[in-house]
Image (cartoon, rainbow, N blue to C red):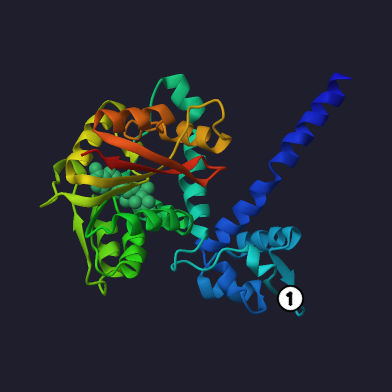
Amino acid sequence: MIDVMKMFKARMYMKRNQPFLYSWHAYVGYELDLFKAFERPMTKRDVADALQLDADLLNQWVSVGVSIGHLKEAGRSRYKIWNAWKLPKPKGNNSSGVLLKEMMELHIPTLLSYPDMMRNQDRLHYDEEKHAPTVAETSRLLEVLALPKISRRLKQTQAASVLDIGCGEGGYIKKLAERFPKTHFTGIEISPSVTEVAKKLTKDNKNISIENADLWKYKPDQPQDMVMMNNVIHYIDLEKRQELFNELASWVKENGMLSVITPIAGGSDSPPFANVFNSFFSSFDNLYRLPEREELAEWGEQAGLELLSIQTVIKEGGWYVVHYEKKS
Ligand SMILES: C[S@@+](CC[C@H](N)C(=O)[O-])C[C@H]1O[C@@H](n2cnc3c(N)ncnc32)[C@H](O)[C@@H]1O
């Protein structure tokens, strides 16, 4: 009986892990531009030669691709992509593949370090400059869902000035600047390489300025109608979060707004993904757990900001956009 249970459980673990194959296959295809290479029917040999890749490993990757329906035989020993809508688009243009890259290169290896970290009572150190470009790009995948909510608020406030803290590639301010041409947008970003990308992507927008700056060393020239801070709270030490809110509040005009996007965790109703984000962030000595709902209200209250709304962006990830108004 015990052997049967053992077998049953092992089988269950394997089955539960099957989706990993799809992600792994898609990640490798994205990282090496293989889906592009097999866009038209190609032999494995030609692709290995053209991209200078190990032929045996490519062979294995193609076999898995055929078995999970990412690739299909196309006659005369050639293969081509199949179910293309499921596959990530090539690199650049904010492809969804960047999420696979972040998961496979950063999240999963980090979570696999748990036994060692727990045994050694140790933490990893998050290499900001190494991961900043990928993380800034993945964050942008949320834009499409969060932007309408921010736009609506901006329209109400008729803001003349907006400041985006930790603006990443400047995706939010670029889209907003196009929709609100009379508003001036400033983005600040600590990573030099990400700042460069943001500058490049917004170079044609006259109402945008991007600066390479650390938020702790920055002060806007004048109070802003709206300050935004999207997906940045987990970079801030828990002890410094109230101080940060006080600082941000001092940058906002009376009756102006603070808009914050963040996953929220810690409640008993938090979705598994929000909890596992916390497991990930807590693995590093320089990243910190996500805020709880009550904390967001409390930090605002202490800083003289009235909490207007907490709206869902992505339920499964526990992602929210939080709006505050500075009391007069
Ligand atoms: C997860 S990304 C989010 C980017 C963008 N706000 C978005 O939501 O798409 C966080 C960004 O904050 C930047 N950042 C972290 N700490 C910062 C600081 N102290 N000052 C300015 N930017 C910071 C990081 O370099 C990174 O690009």
The percent position of residue 170, horizontal first and vertical second, equals 31, 60
User: Does residue 253 lie above or below 48 as drawn?
Assistant: above
The percent position of residue 327, horizontal first and vertical second, equals 24, 38
Q: In which quadrant will I find the C terminus?
A: top left
Q: How many marks?
A: 1
Q: Nearer the viewer, residue 7 or 296?
A: 296
In percent of the image, x 36 and y 53: which residue is there? 153
Any atom of ligand 1 within 8 Å of the CB at mark 1? no
In percent of the image, x 38 and y 58: which residue is there? 151
- Where residue 122 sits, quadrant-wise, is top left
Q: Is residue 170 visible?
A: yes
Q: In which quadrant will I find the N terminus?
A: top right
Q: Is residue 201 left or right of residue 138?
A: left
Badge 1: few (under 14), some or many (20 or more) residues near its Cα, within 10 Å? few
Q: Nearer the viewer, residue 65 or 175?
A: 175
User: Does residue 89 lie above or below 163 as drawn?
Assistant: below
The percent position of residue 193, horizontal first and vertical second, equals 27, 58
In percent of the image, x 51 and y 70: which residue is there? 52
Q: Is residue 49 left or right of residue 6?
A: left
In percent of the image, x 74 and y 76: which residue is there? 77
Q: Is residue 58 left or right of residue 218?
A: right
Q: Is residue 134 left or right of residue 100?
A: left
The percent position of residue 215, horizontal first and vertical second, equals 20, 44
Q: Which residue is mark 1?
A: 77
- Where residue 162 sits, quadrant-wise, is bottom left
User: Does residue 55 lie above or below 303 as drawn?
Assistant: below
Is label 1 in a helix, a strand or a loop? loop
User: Does residue 263 lie above or below 49 as drawn?
Assistant: above
Among all residues in the image, which is located at the extreme right? 1
